[in-house]
């Protein structure tokens, strides 16, 4: 049952990813990305990473994607003028290279006979986050602040405009 | 459980293809998000394998980085679009040597 | 107060130099000349005060610390003692007169203030040389006067020949200077110091070197330096050509002061030379050979300044003979008297040249006696003094050297006496050709007072300065001490019997007077006799007239070969090898970057492609399976 579910979900994930990169119109691409990220959240649930799945939905599909769609709207793209998508051989070649090399690496990774982890318990994550990873956590918060300020500064109207 | 890794690899390769193939800056950024997300998948899978939650923490950080990257990246795209009136990367050739 | 005076003496010419160089163009010629002369005169007065205050003490005064590296230390410090005081007086005194003379001589020159600037710089550098407390500072002065000499010889540099003469002087001096600095290095490695006082104390308990050791090397190197600056064989060739400069410069630098620096240096370092008898003998031989050779050349020169130039070389040879005989007092005495009468002779010749509108060939002169009486009388005084006719300056100093030479060996006395005869002959030949005989149809006139006054003053000096250093038998006769040697502290160590000395002196003086009379007779009257004499010794005459072909020889052996080598290095080594390497490196870099710039397409996709490729390579490196 779980296997069948996994294959269905992974099929959906691949299809939505393809739809992101092959859609001529960025609006459709963005919407496909929303779908992709949602499907990925389901994969997280299958891996018993419940908290991460929720964060994925809230942050990615909720916040980031809204941002994307908003920008796409701001740009007022004219669909007739959008460039045609060309399949560039070297990009396919490079992607193939990446994929095959990653396959090779994972095939060499020792496999575990059974998953040790029972649940992705939120309290355990919180404990780890605020004990061992407290410094990276603070640094990440600083990074987000910097990114926010940066985005504001970049798009602020300068005085002489 | 190797299927998760294989899936992550495929998705990552799709992200690479998108970055290299598309000329629309927005779509390139979306492809980068796909790459990030696929690495998240690999991390969660590995975490389940090993049996601890460190991978989960990493994914949390990754999502935060992705949020920051999206914010700055989109701001840059907006500026570029304002200045060049286009988002086709093939027309940005001022670095030509 | 006293240290004040040192600053004044040393720095007032330098101040004059600065004013001339930076403000010279804005000042009128009168003001410019006055400032310059005044600067040197102030220095002279300061030297005079210093002389009265310190004539019996010796001390060093540090103006400032020059540099201090590890255990090597050199200060800009001056040494005040009898020797340096004497030289200061001679240099500043004669310089003052020559400055005044120059205001008249150079009056028509457009580069008036530059000339005086150089002259002031020269005085400053010469004072540095004289007053230096260590060899390094002395070397600074040594090079500085060389530079000024070069600048002033080539002062009329529009004339290619004159510029060439300056260059020649500079390059020939370089050879000597290289040896000089090698000597300094050797001294430092041997004694670890360059200060005269500590050098003196460290040589106190050394015994004279028997063979040719390290100390002899040092003194020989220093002597080679002296041959460059003081125009001795083999490096004398630059001095006759140095006459291309303005005549007052010839008088000041190339007769009275700078060229005596070598003699001064040997006297300053006499404690070294006393320890190396072999080098002392070398000095005697070189000095003697120079004196005779240049005396012979002077016999046939047509240019009045050339005669005086070779005469200077010859007299410097005398001084070196005296220095080699360890008669440093005599050397310094001859230096002093020579400074007076040779400056006088040069200034007279300058006056003549000025009157003849730049003509220097004596055969085109003649009969100027009545036109230029002051110049004539001054020249006569100078000529008498140079020949050593009693009781003028040259007589006493030359006689002292002759006596020392006799004490060493009669042969040496014979040679020095022979040189004295040569001297007397050529200077009276010059006198007769210039002033006696018939006056040509030229409009000559006596020079202005700015030029004649220094002549008169120098004549007085020439008449009187000799009495400062009376030889022993005179001092016994008149109960007057030899002030000069007493002052310098080098008491004469000569022990000749009274009769011998009287005899030598009498014989020499008689011969000299006879020669002078003959020369005057011969060249004043009929030119036919001269021609007959010339034909009789035609070979010798040609040889002498062409300066024994020394210049040609040097040209062939040293200059031509060096030129060929330089040509080779320029055309083959420099252009092909060195330029090839340099240009090769440059074009390699350029071509490589042209190649690399092909990668810089400016297309974002290509950069992304490269980035992913790099990522794969990094993964390959990081993931070790």
Image (spheres, coloured by chain):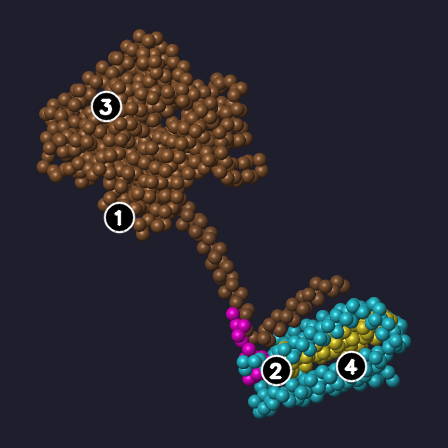
Chain colours: A cyan, B yellow, C brown
Residue at image coords 26%, 19%? C391
Give the mark nearer the N terminus: 1 vs 3: 1
Protein chain holding label 4: A
Residue at mark 3: C384
Protein chain holding label 2: B
Protein chain holding label 3: C
Protein chain holding label 1: C
Residue at mark 4: A56
Label 1, label 3: how many angstroms apart (C-alpha)?
36 Å
Mark 1 closeness class: few <14, some 14–19, many ≥20 residues within 10 Å: few
Same chain? Circles 2 and 1? no
Instruction: Find residue C110 and name its label.
Output: 1
Q: Is residue B5 left or right of residue C288?
A: right
Which stretch appears magenta?
B78-97
Same chain? Circles 1 and 4? no
Query: Relative to C342, does residue C586 appear above or below in the rendering?
Result: below
Mark 2 closeness class: few <14, some 14–19, many ≥20 residues within 10 Å: many
Residue at mark 2: B78
* Residue B6 visible in image: no
Q: Using the image as rendered, state which of residue C200 and residue C605 is in the foreground.
A: C200
Label 3, label 4: how many angstroms apart (C-alpha)?
119 Å
């Amino acid at each position: 049952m779980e296997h069948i579910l996994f294959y269905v979900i992974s099929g959906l994930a691949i299809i939505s990813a393809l739809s992101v990169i092959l859609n001529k119109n960025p609006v459709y691409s963005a919407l496909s990305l929303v779908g992709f990220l949602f499907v990925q959240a389901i994969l997280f649930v299958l891996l018993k990473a419940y908290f991460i799945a929720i964060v994925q939905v809230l942050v990615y599909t909720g916040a980031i994607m809204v941002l994307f769609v908003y920008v796409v709207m701001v740009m007022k793209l004219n669909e007739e003028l959008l460039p045609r998508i060309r399949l560039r051989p070297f990009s396919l070649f490079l992607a193939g290279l990446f994929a095959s090399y990653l396959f090779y690496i994972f095939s060499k990774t020792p496999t575990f006979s059974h998953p040790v982890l029972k649940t992705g318990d939120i309290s355990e994550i919180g404990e780890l986050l605020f004990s061992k990873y407290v410094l990276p956590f603070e640094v990440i918060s600083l990074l987000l602040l910097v990114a926010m300020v940066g985005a504001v500064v970049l798009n602020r109207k300068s005085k002489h405009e | 459980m190797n299927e998760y890794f294989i899936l992550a690899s495929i998705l990552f390769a799709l992200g690479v293809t998108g970055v290299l193939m598309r000329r629309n800056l927005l779509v390139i950024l979306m492809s980068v998000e796909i790459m990030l997300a696929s690495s998240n998948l690999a991390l969660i899978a590995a975490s389940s394998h090993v049996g601890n939650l460190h991978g989960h923490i990493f994914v949390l950080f990754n999502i935060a980085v992705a949020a920051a990257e999206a914010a700055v990246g989109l701001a840059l795209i907006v500026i570029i679009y304002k200045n060049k009136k286009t988002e086709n990367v093939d027309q940005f050739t001022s670095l030509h040597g | 107060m006293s240290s004040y005076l040192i600053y004044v003496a040393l720095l007032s010419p330098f101040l004059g130099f600065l004013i001339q160089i930076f403000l010279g163009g804005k000042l009128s010629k009168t003001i410019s000349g006055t400032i310059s002369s005044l600067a040197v005169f102030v220095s002279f007065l300061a030297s005079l005060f210093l002389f009265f205050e310190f004539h019996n003490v010796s001390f060093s005064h540090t103006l400032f610390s020059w540099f201090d590296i590890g255990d090597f230390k050199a200060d800009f410090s001056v040494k005040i003692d009898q020797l340096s005081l004497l030289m200061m007086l001679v240099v500043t005194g004669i310089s003052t007169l020559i400055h005044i003379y120059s205001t008249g001589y150079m009056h028509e020159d457009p580069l008036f203030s530059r000339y005086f600037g150089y002259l002031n710089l020269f005085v400053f550098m010469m004072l540095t040389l004289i007053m230096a407390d260590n060899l390094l500072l002395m070397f600074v002065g040594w090079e500085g006067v060389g530079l000024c000499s070069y600048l002033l010889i080539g002062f009329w540099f529009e004339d290619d020949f004159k510029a060439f003469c300056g260059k020649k002087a500079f390059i020939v001096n370089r050879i000597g200077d290289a040896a000089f600095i090698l000597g300094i290095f050797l001294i430092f490695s041997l004694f670890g110091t360059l200060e005269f006082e500590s050098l003196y104390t460290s040589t106190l308990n050394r015994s004279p070197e028997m063979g040719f050791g390290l100390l002899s090397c040092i003194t020989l190197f220093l002597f080679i330096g002296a041959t460059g600056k003081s125009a001795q064989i083999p490096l004398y060739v630059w001095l006759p050509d140095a006459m291309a400069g303005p005549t007052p410069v010839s008088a000041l630098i190339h007769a009275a002061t700078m060229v005596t620096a070598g003699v001064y240096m040997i006297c300053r370092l006499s404690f070294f030379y006393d320890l190396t008898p072999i080098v002392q003998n070398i000095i005697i031989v070189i000095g003697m050979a120079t004196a005779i050779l240049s005396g012979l050349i002077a016999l046939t020169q047509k240019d009045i300044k050339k005669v005086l130039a070779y005469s200077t070389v010859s007299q410097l040879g005398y001084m070196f003979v005296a220095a080699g005989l360890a008669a440093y007092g005599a050397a310094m005495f001859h230096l002093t008297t020579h400074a007076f009468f040779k400056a006088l002779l040069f200034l007279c010749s300058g006056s003549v040249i000025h009157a003849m509108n730049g003509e220097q060939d004596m055969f085109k002169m003649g009969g100027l006696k009545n036109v230029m009486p002051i110049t004539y009388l001054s020249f006569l005084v100078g000529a008498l003094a140079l020949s050593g006719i009693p009781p003028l300056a040259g007589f006493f100093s030359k006689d002292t050297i002759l006596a020392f030479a006799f004490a060493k060996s009669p042969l040496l006395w014979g040679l020095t006496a022979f040189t004295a005869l040569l001297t007397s002959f050529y200077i009276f030949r010059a006198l007769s050709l210039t002033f006696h005989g018939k006056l040509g149809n030229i409009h000559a006139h006596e020079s202005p007072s700015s030029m004649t006054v220094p002549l008169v003053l120098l004549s007085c000096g020439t008449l009187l300065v000799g009495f400062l250093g009376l030889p022993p038998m005179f001092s016994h006769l008149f109960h007057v001490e030899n002030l000069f040697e007493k002052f310098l502290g080098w008491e004469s160590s000569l022990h000749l019997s009274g009769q011998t000395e009287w005899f030598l002196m009498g014989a020499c003086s008689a011969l000299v007077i006879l020669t002078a009379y003959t020369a005057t007779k011969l060249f004043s009257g009929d030119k036919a006799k001269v021609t007959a004499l010339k034909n009789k010794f035609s070979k010798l005459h040609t040889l002498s007239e062409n300066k024994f072909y020394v210049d040609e020889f040097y040209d062939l052996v040293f200059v031509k070969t060096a030129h060929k080598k330089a040509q080779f290095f320029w055309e083959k080594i420099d252009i092909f090898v060195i330029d090839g390497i340099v240009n090769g490196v440059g074009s390699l870099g350029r071509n490589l970057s042209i190649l690399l710039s092909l990668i810089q397409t400016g297309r974002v996709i290509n950069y992304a492609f490269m980035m992913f490729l790099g990522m794969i390579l990094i993964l390959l490196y990081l993931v070790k399976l």
